[in-house]
Image (tube, rainbow, N blue to C red):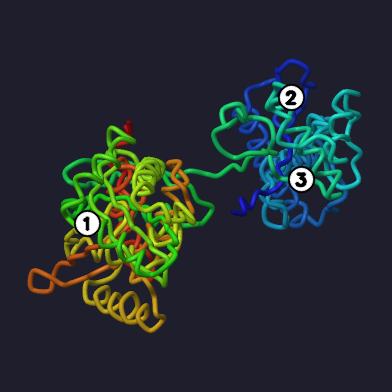
Amino acid sequence: MDARQRPRRVAPPAVGQAGAPRVLQAGDALPLPIRHTNLIFSALFAASLAYLMRRWREKIRSSTPLHVVDLTEILSVFGLVASLIYLLSFFGIAFVQSIVSSSDEDEDFLVGPPAAPGPAPCGHLGGAEGVVPEKMPEEDEEIVASVVAGKVPSYVLETRLGDCRRAAGLRREAVRRITGRQIEGLPLDGFDYASILGQCCELPVGYVQLPVGIAGPLLLDGQRFYVPMATTEGCLVASTNRGCKAIAESGGATSVVLRDAMTRAPVARFPTARRAAELKAFLEDPANFDTLSVVFNRSSRFGRLQGVQCAMAGRNLYMRFSCSTGDAMGMNMISKGVQNVLDYLQDDFPDMDVISISGNFCSDKKPAAVNWIEGRGKSVVCEAVIKEEIVKKVLKTNVQSLVELNVIKNLAGSAVAGALGGFNAHASNIVTAIFIATGQDPAQNVESSQCITMLEAVNDGKDLHISVTMPSIEVCKCIVFICSVITISRHCADDDHKIQFVWSLYNFDTQ
């Protein structure tokens, strides 16, 4: 994701800070408070201008040359020029500059020495083009040279150095030397790299800063929630927030979980298709379910086997296990349970060759009809009735236009495109923003944003009934409802009348 950062100028030290030079401002013309100084020069300008205009009118009437002036007129001219210079420097220049300048930066029009340069960049990071990095300590130079030469693997730096921040800096310098390109716009300092060691994101060289906005309050099932959304897209949070307002002012939304079952589908190959069919029959026989459950459930206190669905392709057998996972999203939980079952089956089917713990029949991080039909993770329906006056006041449209748009665009348009689970305006926008803000896997947006939006006119055509059905939201329990309800609110609020529910942050406590 492109964070689209603008280069930022380093502001000079504030006046009064240690090491900051004394900076004279335009308002320091007199040793008075700035408001008094402004009043004095404004009054001086008005008085000087009025006096000179009166004197020049008298000279014109008496045919006296204008260049013949007395001491009072000289002082008035001086006061007019001085006050005009002050007022322009204080009020006018910044305003004119903001119009004619093409720069996005705000200039501080100060009288005094130029701003002190910002701190020098770390020598491990590489600066702008043409800037020679500071010389590194000899020990660090040797480590970087070894990484560049391939003598030391980059992934062992944290273990060898015992300093994750230093390891990231040296790895970053090695990348710069190998590629010959600077790593610009990617911060290095300000992040706890030790917190991700052995947890996530190997071989770090920096981190990305993403703004997080808050939409809400979202009234769902009688409770109010505020929903974090991490995005670089303009208007996404604003329109979502407007949809939350429409829902709240209409009495709120309600939700129901239709199914809660994470899936994992290993694939095994047999010598013959007949042999694969024998295992298929064994797994789908209700008489064997209790035995399989006992073996599966040994892996976790929360994971409970719900069923097994099998499919064959030649002599390959795909076994789709589904289980409840408590408050967790449950991918690791179900994988361990599936491994227990495979080990158990190996005794009765020694000719079974397990090709992969995931055979893509799950289906994880890919659009698939099996998820759209059978569900995966949390299958949720959310609904709300938006009152006619709220549609007009908040959404700036009418009920009939929204219903017509949903049929022509979200339903018919998606059908023409051959969409799979995409009968909505843009559920993926909201799901991804919430996933990133709450630490979910953004790649699972693929199936989690499968959604069908339905709009109907109710109460004699005056009010709008809106619902979203999302059969495969792959999140922990704390996030599931928020995503579905927020999808509604964003679509309610879009300028082109897109309607869709957004999830609500249900209960942010996880076990």
Residue 160: name its quadrant: top right
- The amino acid beneath tag 3 is Ile
User: Which percent across, then down, holds residue 100?
Assistant: 72, 58
* Residue identifier under label 3: 183
User: Is tag 3's residue or tag 2's residue first in the polypeptide sequence?
Assistant: 2
| Residue 109 percent across, percent down from the top left | 74, 39
Place of residue 327 in the rendered image (x, y in percent of width and height, measured from the top left): 29, 38
Whole-Å distance between the Cαs marked 2 and 1?
Answer: 52 Å
Question: How many residues crowd around disc 1 within 10 Å: few (fewer than 14), some, or many (20 or more)?
Answer: many
Residue that extends furthest to the top in the rendered view of this protein: 18
- Residue in the picture at 18% in, 67% down: 464
**Type of the residue with mark 2:** Arg
Secondary-structure class at tag 2 = helix
Q: Quadrant of the N terminus?
A: bottom right
Q: Where is mark 1, residue-wise?
A: 382
Q: Is residue 84 above or below residue 115?
A: below
Q: Residue at x 77, y 21 (%)?
A: 20
